[in-house]
Amino acid sequence: MSTQSQKPARDRVLRNVSRRGFLAGLGLASAAGAAAASGCASQQQAGTQAAASKVAIIHTNDSHGHDILDEESLGLAAVAQLKHDYEEKGYEVLLFDAGDAAQGENLVNRSQGASAFDFLNQCGYQAMALGNHEFDYGQDKIAGYAAAAHFPLLSANVIVEATGERIVGANTIITLRDGRKVGVFGLTTPEAKTKVNPLLVRGIKVLQEKELYECAQAQVDELRAAGCALVVCLAHLGEATEAAPNRACDVVANVRGIDLVIDGHDHKEENQTLKDAAGADTLVVETGCFTHAVGVVTWEGGKLEGSLSRFGEYNGQDAAVAAGIKAVDDKVKADLAEVVGEVAFDLNGERSPGNRTQETNLGDLVADACLWEAERMANTAPVAAIVNGGSIRKSIHAGEIKLGDVVDTLPFINYMCTASVKGSAILEALEAATSVTPEQMGAFPQVAGMKITIDTSVAFQDAGLYPDTPVKRPAAPGSRVTIDEIGGRPFDPDASYVIAAGDFIFAGGDAYFALGEASQDTLASIGYLTSDCLRYYIAEAMSGAVREDYREPQGRIVIR
């Protein structure tokens, strides 16, 4: 097979046109009735053409550095071996990823994502969507990833505002051995503007809602016009309620002619057929996350069928790829082997039920650590701390706590800061951060020095979106969330409070736009990462042993 792609990195992008002209072009492409009709016809013809040979599309998403075989993950050596297995069965194999490979485990974090692309290259990947966590080390890193990858990194809807160009390529065309063409395009969640530190995504526009649908339709029309028999969307979008109307299902419902969506972002397994805007079938698949499973979609006789090869069921490993990854993993573990303390019980770092849905013992510990460090280092001691639950990525199990465990749990480059903000801004931020509770939300607050009550029987009322974000602004702050006390005293919305939080929150990340707006005049960094705060709190404040009172959550958040 051969691969035809856009030019590399930022030069891969399109033409040097104005942002206004570029966005207008998206609408013109999607409005071309003849092209759309041709696309639908090509989609129907794909069935008869596909009978000539059989194709296996192997896919992953949200690996987050879980690239090595361990007690729950298959790793990328399994992906490489699965590719060999299907080739031996006579399939032509395509290998795709739906994003978020560059950040997560120490295995990739230590190289700021570079090792992740080395591993993907070793496996022979042919295309990857740009996930929101590919932005975690800055936009310049994305250009480096795109240059290092032996495959195109794709996102049709992320635009550099200064130039009107895409930050990476939009699509690629793969020509199969029998001459048929497979068109692949990428989409990135608009939540990239808030799920990543907003300071790292300044100057880019992530098309959402109607513009997102028009962008996707333009890609389909372009690929159909180029003669593609199969159109695949690598969609780092997910299906989470909080992401509506920018989910994969929303794109399918508003776009004609996508045959297959390989989804990611929400860490859920998916294998369902949805109707597109013309009433045709679109298969939507997702593997979950962390290489707990590897997806396979077969294309035979015009029919697409999805399946998962799960951990515990599939045990193949490509020896050469496994050895290469292990060599990197051994070095990373040696670098992070310092013991910083111990704990007699598990600390809950799960998503749900966990840090995105409720108070947890690990959430209490991390928030306390941040408040403790800020009290020591800030010029004006804070009275409370807020940690977004989505920043806590992994549990800490009973036993020794190594430095590697701490930075695995809090992997982001997130500096602890303090600021003096009005109580009303804190209340608005917490109302926004719990808008879908009891469903999971990365913004869900883990707190110290504060007690709050969330009344889920009250419907969240939104007043539209915060500027340049997909996040809903609460119309009635305090209707769902009550701050019962802060700093040991009754809450006053008109009073000012010094609070501690990461620079991610004070930049307006996740749903904390109100704190971002309120904090800029008084913001001060204490110079420590959140992972530093946890490390030193365990080692110094608790003399290396996590106290028994952290065995259970401490009753700071009541949900009713």
Image (cartoon, rainbow, N blue to C red):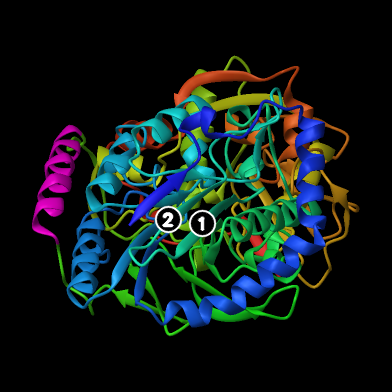
- The stretch drawn in magenta includes residue 334: yes
- Dominant secondary structure of the residues highlighted in magenta in the image: helix
Q: Quadrant of residue 407?
A: top left
Q: Nearer the viewer, residue 276 or 236?
A: 276
Tag shown at residue 184 = 1
Which residue position holds label 2? Answer: 174
The residue carrying pointer 2 sits among few (fewer than 14), some (14 to 19) or many (20 or more) residues within 10 Å by Cα, namely: many
- The stretch drawn in magenta includes residue 311: no
Q: Is residue 383 visible?
A: no
The residue carrying pointer 1 sits among few (fewer than 14), some (14 to 19) or many (20 or more) residues within 10 Å by Cα, namely: many
Position of residue 369 measured from the top left corner of the image (x, y, whole percent): 46, 37
Residue positioned 21% across, 76% down in the render: 314
User: Which region of the structure is painted magenta?
Assistant: 318-335
Q: Furthest-front residue in view?
A: 179
- SS under mark 1: strand
Instruction: In the rendered view, tell whether residue 30 sits above or below residue 106.
Output: below
Position of residue 171 measured from the top left corner of the image (x, y, whole percent): 54, 48
Say whether residue 440 is left or right of residue 547: right
Q: Nearer the viewer, residue 23 or 243?
A: 23
Quadrant occupied by the N terminus:
bottom left
Q: Are the residues at dot 1 and dot 2 in contact (C-beta closer than 8 Å)? A: yes
- SS under mark 2: strand
Amino acid type assigned to the residue bearing label 1 in the image = Val
Q: Quadrant of residue 177?
A: bottom left
Residue positioned 34% across, 77% down in the render: 54
Instruction: In the rendered view, tell whether residue 241 sits above or below residue 368.
Output: below
Instruction: In the rendered view, tell whether residue 524 sits above or below residue 32.
Output: above
Say whether residue 311 is left or right of residue 10: left
